[in-house]
Amino acid sequence: MAEISESQKEQIKKQAKKILDDFADAIESVKIKEKKKTKEVGGFREEKQGKKLDESFRKIMFRNAHQKDEDNIIAEKKKW
């Protein structure tokens, strides 16, 4: 691997500074529109008194579940 001399290092630093300064000048005139946050967070439901569960359905669901922890089925979320 070839070594870089001090004069080459200085030249590289000057080139890099010029590139950064030119870039800063170029983006100075860019106008970014501010996003408006008008949409409220949704998708939640109110908890209510549920219907009486069908125990046979519950047993079948738990029997078919790959992973379960007492009264909870452990499932993947958005992994597809």
Image (spheres, rainbow, N blue to C red):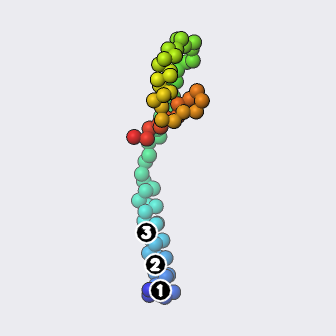
Q: Quadrant of residue 27?
A: bottom left
**Between marks 2 and 1 in the image, the one whose residue lies nearer the viewer:** 1
| Residue toward you, 4 or 71 | 71
Is 48 left or right of 78, judged from the image as shown?
Answer: right
Q: Residue at x 50, y 22 (%)?
A: 59
What is the tally of numbered marks visible in this picture? 3
* Marks 2 & 1, CB-CB < 8 Å contact: yes
Secondary structure state at the residue bearing disc 3? helix
Taking depth in this image into account, of 8 and 22 the one nearest to the observer is 8
Q: Which residue is mark 3?
A: 19
Of badges 3 and 2, the one in the foreground is: 2
Front-lying residue, 47 or 34: 47
Which amino acid, mark 3? Ile
User: Which residue is under mark 1?
Assistant: 4
Q: Quadrant of the C terminus?
A: top left
The type of residue carrying mark 2 is Ile
**Precedes in sequence: disc 2 or disc 1:** 1
Pointer 1 or 3: first along the chain: 1
Percent coordinates x, y for residue 73 in the rendering: 52, 31
Indicate which disc residue 12 carries. 2
Mark 3 neighbour density, 10 Å: few (under 14) some (14–19) many (20 or more): few
Task: Describe the element under mark 1 as helix, strand or loop.
Answer: loop
